[in-house]
């Protein structure tokens, strides 16, 4: 049987790509709803039409079995899946493709590839699911002799399960579905579900400090890590497996968010838990986003810790089919493997009622059932899961679709939100002539929310990258100028470097450079990300 192949330019598998007739039909519906875009979809440059420069490197005989340099493999591993990446791949533009793509089957082969690449003077990029949305995978190589991409997806097993401590040792290449299928055999779950869950990997989540779908308490992969193992050019990096430790700076915390610059993550011990059996959900309407934000702040500080607490502004609720544009919508949910969550939901709805929130019906369920979910919740969830696929269609029909996310404390949120909307919206109108900027909360904490902004605007075909750069500059400047973080859960990559450099203390930057010199003396690991060699 032939292997099911991923699309070389966009999200998902090749066999999931809509036909041109289907795209044309979708274009009519989308442009009619948004009021901009083209009803005549462009076609992506086919793989057969792409010409790459000849590989500058050739692996030694001992590694040839696991290394490839064919056009498909090099193209697939050249980019992540940011808007800019997809536009370039859609048009057949591959400026810095890897010369060799390695597919190691175990840690010994990872080390052999790493040793060869470093000794050859090449740059090395660890590759998990290729789902980076911040330019984490490709860039100029400077004086490196070439680029080797190490694809870790063959390292995809749950190696050990400790049911007493509720922990599991998992290889870094396991995608979300693969590791969940293996954990389910033990009645367990990692409970980490980013939007990229289908294709992203555990190692990628750790390297980028990924945020999951759940809105409170264990929001980031950080919260689930017990210990991490990584390979570096000077040796292995592995922390002791412990529930917690106060022994100096944490080795795990240095690898979390390191984005492939301090080592190739190969496995980790992760905190797991029994799969939930009790659930409750509700869709709560508020007159406006500000009122809903007040209610969410109260919920975040109540100690109830809902599983889902996503506040969606009226514009985004309408766009996703979860509302009519007249109200903000709160998608609220609780789940547990231990106890009935209805008392928690009842108290949460009381808090919402105190701020004018209204709801019609609630979904609940036990014994693993999701119950009768509210239609608005279902509509929003479906739109959330479809979003990466829809973006490919939007690019084909001339619509700029981009997001940016951040976090800010509650006391500064109102002014922050107003300023960011104004400055990002002004940039969209100036650059594109029309468009919208909407917002939702993806995660909430007792001290502040994580706002997530979505931009939809008409794109000038052939000038999308220039439009993107201007809007990205304005939105990112606004976030940093107003005291937010340049990223809450999307990582830094190359796209966020200018603003990350402004956000971090310079003394810390110097310490990070010193750490990289210690484990990667030649600067081979993912150059250009986080720090310069």
Image (cartoon, helix red, strand yellow):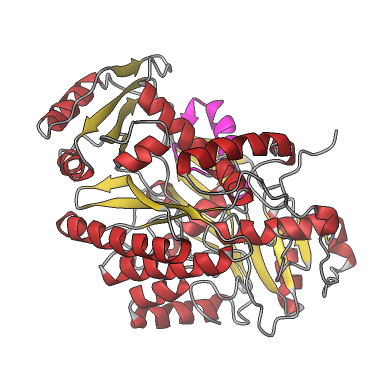
Depth order, front residue of 450/278: 450
x, y percentage for residue 345? 22, 25
Residue 284 horizontal side relative to residue 463, left or right: left
x, y percentage for residue 498? 44, 76
Q: Check residue 5 for magenta coloring.
A: no
Q: Check residue 190 for magenta coloring.
A: yes
Q: Residue at x 59, y 41 (%)?
A: 389
Q: Residue at x 27, y 18 (%)?
A: 340
Relative to 392, say whether 50 is above or below.
Answer: below
x, y percentage for residue 49? 84, 58
Q: Which quadrant of the figure contains the N terminus?
A: top right
Depth order, front residue of 87/152: 87
Q: Residue at x 53, y 81 (%)?
A: 532
x, y percentage for residue 394? 57, 47
Region rendered in magenta? 172-195
Instruction: Evaluate whether residue 193 shows in this view.
Output: no
Residue 148 horizontal side relative to residue 489, left or right: right
Residue 300 horizontal side relative to residue 373, left or right: left
Q: Residue at x 72, y 55 (%)?
A: 76
Quarter location, residue 489: bottom left
Q: How many marks?
A: 0
């Amino acid at each position: 049987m032939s292997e099911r192949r991923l699309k070389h330019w966009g999200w998902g598998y090749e066999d999931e790509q809509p036909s041109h007739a289907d795209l044309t039909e979708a274009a009519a519906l989308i442009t009619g709803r948004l009021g901009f875009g083209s009803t005549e979809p462009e076609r992506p440059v086919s793989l057969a039409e792409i010409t790459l420069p000849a590989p500058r490197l050739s692996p030694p005989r001992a590694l040839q079995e696991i290394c490839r340099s064919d056009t498909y493999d090099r193209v697939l591993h050249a980019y992540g899946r940011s808007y800019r990446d997809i536009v370039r791949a859609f048009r057949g533009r591959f400026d810095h493709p890897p010369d060799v793509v390695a597919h190691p089957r175990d840690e010994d082969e990872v080390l052999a590839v790493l040793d060869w690449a470093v000794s050859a003077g090449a740059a090395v990029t660890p590759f998990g699911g290729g789902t980076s949305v911040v330019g984490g995978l490709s860039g100029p190589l400077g004086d490196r002799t070439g680029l080797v991409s190490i694809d870790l997806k063959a390292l995809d097993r749950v190696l050990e399960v400790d049911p007493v401590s509720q922990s599991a040792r998992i290889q870094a290449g396991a995608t979300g579905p693969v590791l969940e299928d293996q954990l389910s055999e033990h009645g367990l779950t990692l409970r980490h579900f980013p939007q990229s869950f289908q294709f992203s990997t555990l190692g990628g989540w750790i390297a980028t400090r990924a945020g999951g779908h759940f809105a409170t308490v264990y929001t980031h992969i950080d919260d689930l890590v017990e210990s991490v193992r990584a390979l570096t050019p000077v040796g292995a990096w592995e922390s002791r497996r412990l529930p917690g430790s106060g022994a100096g700076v944490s080795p795990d915390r240095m690898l979390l968010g390191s984005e492939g610059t301090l080592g190739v993550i190969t496995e980790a011990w992760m905190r797991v838990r029994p799969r939930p059996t009790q659930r409750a959900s509700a869709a709560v309407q508020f007159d406006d986003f500000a009122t809903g934000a007040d209610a969410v702040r109260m919920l975040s500080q109540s100690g109830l810790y809902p599983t889902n607490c996503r506040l969606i502004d009226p514009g985004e609720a309408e766009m996703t089919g979860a509302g009519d544009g007249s109200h903000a919508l709160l998608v609220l949910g609780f789940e547990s493997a231990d106890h009935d969550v209805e008392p928690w939901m009842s108290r949460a709805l009381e808090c919402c009622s105190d701020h004018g929130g209204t709801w019609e019906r609630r979904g609940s369920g036990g014994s693993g059932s999701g119950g009768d979910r509210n239609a608005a919740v279902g509509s929003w969830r479906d739109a959330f899961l479809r979003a990466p696929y829809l973006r490919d269609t939007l690019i084909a029909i001339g619509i700029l679709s981009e997001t940016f996310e951040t976090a800010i404390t509650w006391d500064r949120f109102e002014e922050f939100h107003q300023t960011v909307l104004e400055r990002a919206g002004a940039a969209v109108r100036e650059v594109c002539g029309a468009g919208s900027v909407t917002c939702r909360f993806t995660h909430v904490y007792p001290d502040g929310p994580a706002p997530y902004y979505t931009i939809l605007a008409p794109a000038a075909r052939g000038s999308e990258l220039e439009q993107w750069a201007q809007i990205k500059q304005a939105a990112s400047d606004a976030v940093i100028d107003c005291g937010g973080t340049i990223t809450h859960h999307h990582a830094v990559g190359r796209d966020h470097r200018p603003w990350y450099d402004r956000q971090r203390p310079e003394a810390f930057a110097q310490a990070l450079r010193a750490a990289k010199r210690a484990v990667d003396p030649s600067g081979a690991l993912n150059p250009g990300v986080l720090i310069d060699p």
